[in-house]
């Protein structure tokens, strides 16, 4: 076999391998796992491994810096349930979840119904409603820390200028019930845009004929 034949054979093999690689990439059987594989690996390493490590540590007697990891079953959980701190945390969690979700559902339904109607400045209002969701968390955190600051609170300043309070103002994050209200307000501010968009999308998918028929029947 001369050199020209060897070159032609190598080129043919190379072209065949390239076509095979392209066909594999075009196949849904291989392309899907290839694209989603890195994301799954990232989630498993970042979330899955720490989660299962936390489960393992919760049923062992390991301590920070300790070398022993003896199995203790549910002893850690039974020891925590009866403590006042756990009961207070559980009560605060239920209070936060119930109040915040009720406020989010009420406001998101109201905003979604209002945004279905045509009025001037509708696009601007939609942008302002969606802004808390798309804004970086770091900027929102700095702004809320300034709003609830014990010394330079813009909220206290506004209330003082309006004549609603006297003196230095409220310690928004230093009093239990004020801290709960402040945290709920921040959570509602952050989650309200997403809930509004979801409800607005659902309402927009309803055919206009149904809305017209409901209006004729007096449904509003």
Image (tube, rainbow, N blue to C red):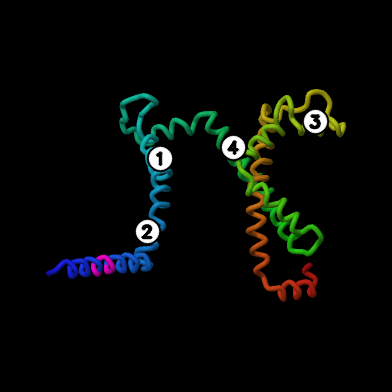
Name which of mark 2 and mark 4 comes first in the sequence: 2
Q: Which mark is residue 91?
A: 4
What is the CA distance from the residue labelled 3 to the residue labelled 4? 32 Å
Magenta stretch bounds? 12-16
Instruction: Evaluate if marks 2 and 4 touch, with contact meaning CB atoms under 8 Å apart.
Output: no
206 in relation to 128, above or below: below
Vertical placement of residue 36 versus 50, above or below: below
The one nearer the camera, 38 or 186, is 38
Label tally = 4
Give the number of the disc on residue 50.
Answer: 1
Question: 115 or 3: nearer the eye?
Answer: 3
Earlier in the chain: of badge 1 and badge 3, it is 1
Q: Label 2: which residue?
A: 34
Query: In what quadrant of the picture does the C terminus appear?
Result: bottom right
Q: Horizontal and vertical percent for residue 190?
A: 64, 45
- N-term-proximal mark, 4 vs 1: 1
Residue 157 numbered tag: 3
Cα–Cα gap, marks 2 and 3 = 56 Å
Mark toward the viewer: 2 or 4:
2
């Amino acid at each position: 076999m001369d050199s020209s034949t060897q070159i032609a054979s190598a080129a043919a093999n190379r072209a065949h391998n390239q076509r095979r690689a392209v066909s594999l990439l075009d196949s849904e059987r291989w392309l899907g796992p290839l694209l989603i594989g890195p994301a799954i690996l990232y989630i498993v390493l970042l979330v899955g491994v720490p989660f299962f490590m936390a489960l393992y540590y919760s049923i062992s007697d390991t301590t920070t810096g300790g070398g022993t990891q003896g199995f203790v079953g549910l002893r850690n959980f039974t020891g925590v349930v009866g403590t006042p701190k756990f009961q207070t945390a559980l009560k605060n969690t239920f209070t936060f979840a119930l109040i915040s979700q009720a406020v989010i559902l009420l406001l998101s339904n109201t905003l979604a119904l209002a945004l279905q109607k045509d009025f001037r400045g509708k696009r601007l209002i939609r942008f302002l409603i969606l802004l808390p969701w798309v804004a970086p968390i770091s900027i929102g955190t700095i702004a809320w820390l300034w709003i609830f600051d014990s010394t330079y609170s813009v909220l206290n300043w506004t209330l003082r200028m309006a004549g609603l309070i006297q003196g230095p103002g409220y310690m928004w994050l230093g009093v239990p019930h004020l801290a709960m209200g402040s945290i709920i307000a921040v959570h509602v501010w952050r989650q309200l845009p997403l809930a509004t968009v979801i409800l607005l999308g659902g309402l927009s998918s309803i055919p206009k004929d149904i809305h017209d028929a409901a209006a004729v029947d007096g449904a509003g």
